[in-house]
């Protein structure tokens, strides 16, 4: 039998982590992180990592896996998460996957198109072009090759832009062709998808409040600490939303107040992209995050769907 997993879906700031924690307590569960930033050590405030108390209350996996200057990608996530999920099943517990990185969730539940191996010389050439002329010219070149990438690769996504151009130059066909051929038809798990939705005004309000709370919690000092450890602000994880804005403050390009406003705006844009991706997903049970009975409704739904699996309540603190 395929392992059964619960996947909590939804845009940033909608309340996925809080729900996952409650479900894990009630359903004898362990949480598998699917947020591409929480895998990095020392990136705590800006990634919204669960607190130490929460991690002591419920076992979490794939948090603090690598240093900020080390490689981590969807293929590595899929391998590690799959191992963890099988181990959780062997302990007769339920795996609750939680995080907003769509590529990671897709890789885990439907497989991954890995494509041809890397060509280091070609990659260095593309990276040099970006260093000398910026990312926009390469992104425009990619769009000319394959207009569909505008819905899958963000104009600021350096890593995936380089990879898509690399695949095209190595194979003569755009990456979307290979992805379509692959069709992501693997189904290693039985997946129960829980989607959290929220009115746009409420969601944006949550994003704005959470962004301000991160600043109050010492987000800028966290990034200064990363620089003091020797990590470059140009690293991929430090170029993500929030960290990029704190980096601009450290470089003297923005005031903290201006950085906060840009951070709010970029996070809202991220949420909008996540919502677009989520709307394309099938078989998602949707729940309103403003419903005061949401936790109980989700719990009842999961119990009905997974009644044959390990649903006894886990002891507190285990």
Image (cartoon, rainbow, N blue to C red):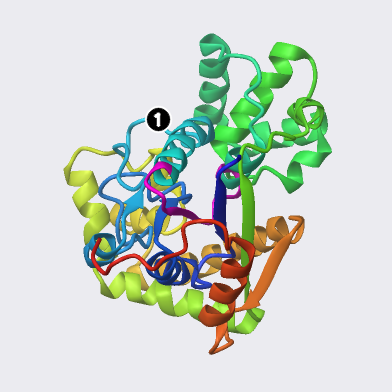
Q: Residue at x 34, y 53 (%)?
A: 60
Q: Is residue 96 magenta?
A: yes
Name the residue that disc number 1 marks. Answer: 71
Label 1's element? loop
Q: Is residue 82 left or right of residue 277?
A: left
Foreground: 56 or 221? Answer: 56
Q: Please indicate, yes or no, whether residue 98 appears anywhere in the rendered image.
A: no
The quarter in which the N terminus is drawn is top right
Query: Which portion, as a residue range, is magenta?
Result: 90-104
Q: Position of residue 126 (x, y in %)?
A: 58, 22
Q: Is residue 30 magenta?
A: no
Q: Residue furthest front?
A: 308
The quarter in which the C terminus is drawn is bottom left
Q: Please indicate, yes or no, whether residue 257 appears anywhere in the rendered image.
A: yes
Q: Position of residue 251 (x, y in %)?
A: 31, 52
Q: Position of residue 271 (x, y in %)?
A: 60, 64
Foreground: 65 or 80? Answer: 80
């Amino acid at each position: 039998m395929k392992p059964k997993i619960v996947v909590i879906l939804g845009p940033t700031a909608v309340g996925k982590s809080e729900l996952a924690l409650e479900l894990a307590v009630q359903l004898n569960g362990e949480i598998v992180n699917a947020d591409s930033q929480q895998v990095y050590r020392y990136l705590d405030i800006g990634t919204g990592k669960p607190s130490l108390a929460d991690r002591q209350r419920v076992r979490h996996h794939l948090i603090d896996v690598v240093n900020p200057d080390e490689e981590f990608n969807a293929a590595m996530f899929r391998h590690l998460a799959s191992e963890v999920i099988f181990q959780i099943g062997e302990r007769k517990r339920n795996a609750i996957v939680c995080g907003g990185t769509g590529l990671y969730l897709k890789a885990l539940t439907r497989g991954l198109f890995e494509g041809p191996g890397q060509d280091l010389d070609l990659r260095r050439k593309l990276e040099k072009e970006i260093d000398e002329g910026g990312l926009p010219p390469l992104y425009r070149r990619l769009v000319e090759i394959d207009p569909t990438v505008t819905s899958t690769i963000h104009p600021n996504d350096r890593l995936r832009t380089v990879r898509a151009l690399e695949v095209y130059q190595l194979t003569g066909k755009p990456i979307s062709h290979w992805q379509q051929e692959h069709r992501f038809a693997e189904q290693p798990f039985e997946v129960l998808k829980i989607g959290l939705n929220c009115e746009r005004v409420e969601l944006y309000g949550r994003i704005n409040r959470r962004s301000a709370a991160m600043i109050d919690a010492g987000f800028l000092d966290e990034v200064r600490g990363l620089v003091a450890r020797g990590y470059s602000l140009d690293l991929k994880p430090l170029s993500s939303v929030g960290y990029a804005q704190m980096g601009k403050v450290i470089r003297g390009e923005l005031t903290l107040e201006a950085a906060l406003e840009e951070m709010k705006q970029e996070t809202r844009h991220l949420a909008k992209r996540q919502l677009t991706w989520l709307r394309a997903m099938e078989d998602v049970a949707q729940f309103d995050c403003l419903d005061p009975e949401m936790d109980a409704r989700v719990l009842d739904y999961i119990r009905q769907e997974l009644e044959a699996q390990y649903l006894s309540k886990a002891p507190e603190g285990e």
